[in-house]
Image: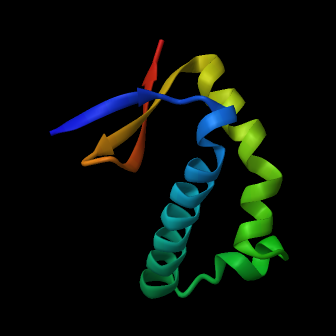
């Protein structure tokens, strides 16, 4: 069974970065496979650099509009979930 952990940027930043990287890699591969779009060439930086440069602003905008939780299953943080106000 899973638990929802309230997101705290000071505690969970690296986990959030890892989850974002996993999601963006999946999204980019789907765009490449289905539409022949190379997302990363248009951004002109590595995925890791892009996430590191945007994660703080992204997370703060999410938190401003709702509550961000991380799903924890068997001790592992697996996914982030947003509940909007």
Residue 52 image position (x, y, % from top left): 77, 56
Position of 15 relative to 41 (above/below): above
> Residue 71 falls in which quadrant of the image?
top left
Q: Residue furthest top?
A: 85
Residue 22 image position (x, y, % from top left): 50, 66
Nearest to the observer: residue 8 or residue 40: 8
Residue at horizontal 57 percent and vertical 60 percent from the top = 18
Residue at horizontal 48 percent and vertical 12 percent from the top = 85
Left or right of 79 on screen, residue 59: right
Position of 59 relative to 65 (above/below): below
Q: Residue furthest left?
A: 1
Left or right of 40 on screen, residue 74: left
Nearest to the observer: residue 11 or residue 23: 11
Residue at horizontal 64 percent and vertical 83 percent from the top = 38
Residue 53 image position (x, y, % from top left): 83, 54
Nearest to the observer: residue 34 or residue 78: 78
Left or right of 77 on screen, residue 56: right
What's the colour scheme?
rainbow
Residue at horizontal 63 percent and vertical 52 percent from the top = 14
Q: How many marks?
A: 0
Q: Residue furthest front?
A: 75
Quadrant where the N terminus sits is top left
Residue 70 image position (x, y, % from top left): 43, 37
Position of 39 relative to 58 (above/below): below
């Amino acid at each position: 069974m899973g638990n929802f952990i309230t997101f705290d940027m000071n505690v969970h930043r690296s986990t959030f970065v890892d989850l974002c990287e996993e999601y963006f890699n999946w999204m980019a591969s789907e765009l490449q496979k289905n539409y022949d779009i190379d997302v990363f060439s248009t951004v002109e930086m590595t995925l890791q650099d892009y996430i590191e440069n945007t994660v703080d602003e992204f997370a703060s905008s999410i938190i401003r509009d709702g509550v961000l939780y991380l799903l924890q299953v068997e001790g592992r943080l697996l996914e982030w979930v947003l509940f909007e106000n």
